[in-house]
């Protein structure tokens, strides 16, 4: 594609890369506008300071959808270190009943706890407060709306040809529905058309109320509570973000760039 931005040779998606970036003074150098990470607590603690603050843009996925997708994805993802071909011999119910270190993934990541470390209601309270104070929340179930909000916060003008082309590529590609199949993730059926999702691993869904749903919901009970809170924040932030967009257009024109560094990750 038409790429005209610069990148920094450091991997902020992992802990060692974050520590290397901190040693390099990445944020303090003001060479980077956007940082991606799957370690938000580590990045926040080591990369930023009171003189160099960031704004977090985060995409959150329903906890059940996340773990079910992981179950099917790692059965075939031979390129992943965590490839699990043996899971193909299990039903989702059998897999759900097995012990897992991946429970309450979102709460763990937000408070900086490792897999296997216990998490409790105090961690949930801390995670909720972190999200409330610091995060522009997006939902994977509302992907297009989420990225519209991210664009507003980042000062991206969707009317510019290059940006419009990008949005159309990911959210504007539609085709006629051949058959209705609500059990498969990867196609969202609607009124006579479907939006083809990119980077999607089609698999059967787990329906609320089934034994496997109940087991997974219980194992990820803190994440379930956190996600319900995030859904409320998603609704509450709408007016604030769109009023900000109006102010930007009125004062500066739409295509502006924030002075703060941006920190973006997905859960």
Image (cartoon, helix red, strand yellow):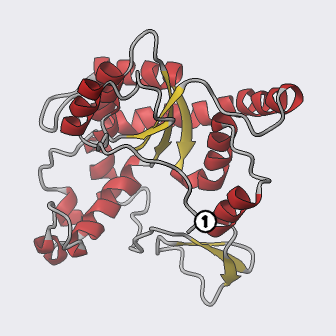
Nearest the eye: 241 or 28: 28
Residue at the image point whose x is 29% and y is 42% from the top: 10
Q: How many marks?
A: 1
* Quadrant that contains the C terminus: top left
Relative placement, left or right, of 247 versus 168 is right
**How far across and how far down the image is residue 154, in percent?**
63, 37
Question: In the displayed image of the protein, which residue is found farthest to the top?
Answer: 50
Asked if residue 187 is positioned above or below residue 231 in the image, the reply reads below
State the residue position of label 1: 170
**How far across and how far down the image is residue 68, in percent?**
32, 61
Residue at the image point whose x is 18% and y is 37% from the top: 16
**How far across and how far down the image is residue 116, in percent?**
12, 37
Q: Give the image quarter of residue 206.
A: bottom left
Q: Give the image quarter of residue 122.
A: top left
Asked if residue 108 is positioned above or below residue 82 in the image, the reply reads above
Q: Residues within 10 Å of mark 1 (few under 14, many from 20)?
A: some
**How far across and how far down the image is residue 124, in percent?**
35, 24
Residue at the image point whose x is 31% and y is 45% from the top: 9
């Amino acid at each position: 594609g038409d790429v005209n931005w610069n990148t920094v040779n450091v991997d902020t998606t992992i802990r060692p890369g974050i520590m290397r970036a901190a040693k390099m003074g990445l944020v303090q150098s003001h060479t980077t506008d956007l940082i991606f990470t799957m370690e938000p607590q580590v990045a926040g603690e080591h990369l930023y300071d009171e003189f160099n603050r960031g704004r977090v843009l985060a995409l959150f996925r329903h906890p059940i959808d996340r773990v079910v997708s992981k179950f099917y994805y790692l059965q075939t993802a031979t390129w992943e270190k965590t490839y699990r071909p043996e899971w193909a011999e299990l039903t989702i119910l059998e897999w759900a009943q097995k012990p897992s270190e991946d429970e309450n993934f979102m709460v763990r990541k937000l408070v900086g706890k490792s897999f296997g470390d216990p998490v409790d209601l105090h961690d949930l309270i801390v995670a909720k407060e972190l999200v409330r104070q610091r995060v522009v929340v997006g939902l994977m179930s509302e992907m297009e709306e989420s990225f519209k909000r991210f664009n507003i916060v980042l000062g991206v003008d969707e009317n510019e040809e290059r940006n419009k082309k990008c949005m159309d590529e990911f959210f504007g590609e539609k085709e006629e529905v051949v058959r209705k199949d609500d059990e498969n993730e990867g196609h969202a059926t609607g009124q006579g058309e479907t939006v083809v999702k990119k980077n999607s691993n089609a698999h059967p869904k787990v329906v609320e109320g089934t034994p496997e749903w109940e087991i997974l919901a219980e194992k990820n009970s803190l994440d379930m509570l956190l996600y319900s809170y995030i859904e409320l924040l998603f609704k509450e932030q709408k007016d604030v973000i769109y009023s900000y967009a109006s102010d930007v257009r009125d004062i500066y024109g739409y295509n502006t760039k924030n002075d703060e560094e941006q920190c973006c990750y997905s859960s």
